[in-house]
Image (cartoon, grey):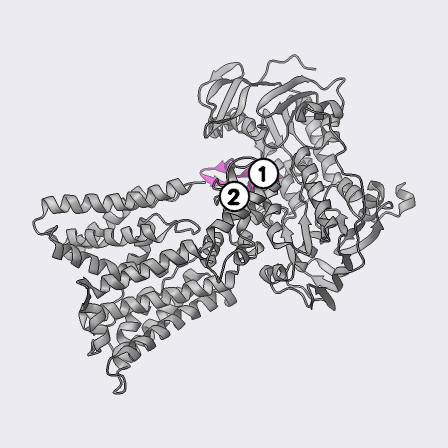
Amino acid sequence: MSNAAPVLAAQGLVKRFFGNPVLKDVSIEIVPGRVHALLGENGAGKSTLVNLLSGVLSPDEGRLLVDGQPCARLTPALARRHGIAVVQQELSLAPHLSVVENVALGAVPTRRGLIDYRRLAVEVGRVLDRLGLDVALDQPVEELPLGRRQLVEIAKALYRQPRVLILDEPTSSLTAHEVQALFKVLAELKREGTALVYISHRMNEIMHLCDWVTVLKDGTRTADRTMDGIDPPALVRLMVGREPGDLFPPFRSTTRDEPALEARALTAPGVGGVDLVVRQGEVLGIGGLLGQGQEELLLALYGALDAQAERLATGGVDRPSRNPADAIGRGLAYVPADRKREAVLLPLSIGFNLTLPGLRRLARRGLRRFAREAEVARELTAKLNVRGGGPERAVQLLSGGNQQKVALARWLPLSPKVLLLNDPTRGVDVDTKREIYLRLKGMAAGGMAVILLSSDALELVHLCDRVLVFRDGRIAADLPHGQASEEAIVAASLGVARQEAA
Amino acid sequence: MSGLLRHRVTLGWLVVVALWVAAGLLKPGFAKIGHLRYLLELASITGIVAAGQTLVVIGGGIDLSVAAIITFAAIILPLLTFPFDPSGMGAVAMTLAITTAIGGLNGIGVVLLRVHPLILTLATATILQGALILIAGGSAISTVNPAVTFLGNGALFGLPMTIVTWLVIAAVTLFVLHGTVLGSWLFALGTNDRAARLAGVGAGQAILAVHAASGFCAGLAGLLLLGMNRQGYVGIGEPYLLGSIAAVVLGGTSILGGRGTYLGTIAGSILLVTITALITVVNASPGWRAILFGGLILGLLLISGRERSG
């Protein structure tokens, strides 16, 4: 594609964590004016490689070259000075600071030692315009929906006018419209000669955007080639090392007659009067554009948001749950989307995390029974195939997909009647996705009602008995399986009549 | 992670041992059994206050009302002397019930009013101090309560009652932290409050319980102090606010919550008392001694109590 010399290159990188190699002899060349896809399952070593390239970690063996010059010790500060910018998958914004402060954090223009706010506003405004991000500059980031926050994160990287821009799952929370705007900017950057590294689990984005691809599998490089003449199944084969079966299990409804949860005229902050019934064994999908009240609905059902309802019956009680502990007592369970902030306790052990929700039931009169806890932790790690260490290791040492398995597995000992899933496969690799789908269908088959909020329309199409599409805090469409096609869901979420969309 | 924690606790104990050995060699009379026992008696007051403080801090909070509660207990008890209570046990029970209730009110304020414990317990302390001035009027109040005198000066199997009491409190605290659901909830809440609540942790109950426990411990410490001094006065509890928090942090417990153990706090309490004892031999004015004391605590914190970055 481009014959330019690499701006950033790595040769024979090896990195071990606690003696376990996570990268084995990996080389990569990042070239100006090229979009370089980095593919691999969670735990394949992508994040580690990005951390090495941006100076967050230093390699145990191998070397890094910037502009062809060996760089003995790359630090984050040095990487920034070389023009290497990373857009992290896990957002690294300061929630209380404003949009403009976050974008310019650490690179504020000054005049005589004071912040030059006028210049700041102009420069940040230019970057935001470029991304099509229409937000008030002085708005605190915490008030923005997740998708907007992700764009602010990208704006933060662009503001520094990087020579190398590494994007780790940048579109995971973006709407289709925002993705288009981002792609336009990336194409411009490419023309201007920026070297781009693009990490994503969305194959169509990779196919559309990238010129070159490096595939990692279990810490080794299984491919490093042009994207010309390669198709998605071939890429998936390189990632998993075997023929990809169907991502989704064949659809089979396990819905029973008995309702597991009924709500009438449910209102909560962001939710304006929702009626819904979920039956035992049913998988009910919740779709729509981001921030249309879907997450608030789950939180309201779970007692984590103040809710009012004419009727909210589950677990033999007809009233909104007072708090999560109350909701759990009624047979509800909730798996949050933001697993690091809301689900797992990162510095604590896998075993602690797995037993925490069911701790009171495992204990006898408030006294912990360690043998039973250990047994439960062992069973759960085996059952959900959690890879990455024994139950005494800290959860933060696990890959994202395995953390998500912990976030899900910890509810199993409680046998919930209604499982609330908030985008359970966000940023999760293909293999773990499939495991989660099978687990979810299995739980439904056992009689559990599953409410699945997903930003991935295909999940709603292939897994759900029924899909509720949300718009402005209300149900805009109730589509049974079969009628809930990708087009129908998107059309309903945009408020477009079906015929026009088709 | 747990290895590091154990390491920090071990570090605290090693500093204590090193200090005792050095002081024993340099200062004649330091290593005498009687003197060491006296140090432990003093440490037990800090240690008992710091037991409640450890629970609160690991749960992600802080209790700034302990000093005021200690004073409150030491002054209220002599006023609770009644002819139908010759042993004084009734007065002890009543005093502890009152201080536990004060702690419980702290907890209710934190849970229901959603005021940060830092500001809420500070307000409680100020209110208590005002009430004490109204009750005691600035004069010392002596007591003839036999139960309190026994607690402060008596012995059981040759061990001073203060140390016996401390051992009991230490055993209960360690058991609560590491052997009960409440203890696990505290670690979860201190690590990540939102994630813990979403996982069904009974945050309200746990916060209420630890603040009540802290009120109980401070009240008990106040009674022991009263027994040792035989009189209570406004300001008697003052040194134990910084003392209890310093003992917690010197013992390797994170002031941000979620990480730590009472084993470290025990070492921290002994360390504080030992430093105080060693400073008294320095020939300097009280002002300079206070500055030296503060400087030494800072120095020790650099060794064992620093928060890891990121």
Query: Looking at the image, which residue is at 39% across and 44% down?
Result: B307
Against B66, residue A412 (above or below) is: above
Against B102, residue B41 (above or below) is: above
Range shown magenta: A101-124
In the displayed orientation, state which residue is furthest to the left.
B28
Name the residue that disc number 1 marks: A386
For mark 2, name the chain: A
| Residue type (three-letter) at the residue carrying disc 1 | Val
Against A496, residue A276 (above or below) is: below
Q: Quadrant of residue A298?
A: bottom right
Name the residue that disc number 2 marks: A350
Q: Is residue A195 visible?
A: no
Q: Nearer the viewer, residue A261 or B69?
A: A261
Against A469, residue B218 (above or below) is: below
Q: Nearer the viewer, residue A244 or A456?
A: A244
Q: Are marks 1 and 2 in contact (CB under 8 Å)?
A: yes
Residue A165: give x, y in percent of width and height: 60, 28
Q: How many residues crowd around disc 2 within 10 Å: few (fewer than 14), some, or many (20 or more)?
A: many
Q: Is residue B307 visible?
A: yes
The reply, left or right, for residue B151 in relation to residue A24 is left
For mark 1, name the chain: A
The reply, left or right, for residue B95 in relation to residue A262 is left
The answer to which of marks 1 and 2 sits earlier in the sequence is 2
Please, what secondary structure does the residue beneath circle 1 have?
A: loop
Residue A232: give x, y in percent of width and height: 75, 25
In the displayed orientation, state which residue is furthest to the right.
A499
Q: Which quarter of the rendered picture does the N terminus of chain B lie within? A: top left
Residue B141: give x, y in percent of width and height: 21, 77
Q: Nearer the viewer, residue A486 or A347?
A: A347
Q: Nearer the viewer, residue A71 or B223?
A: B223
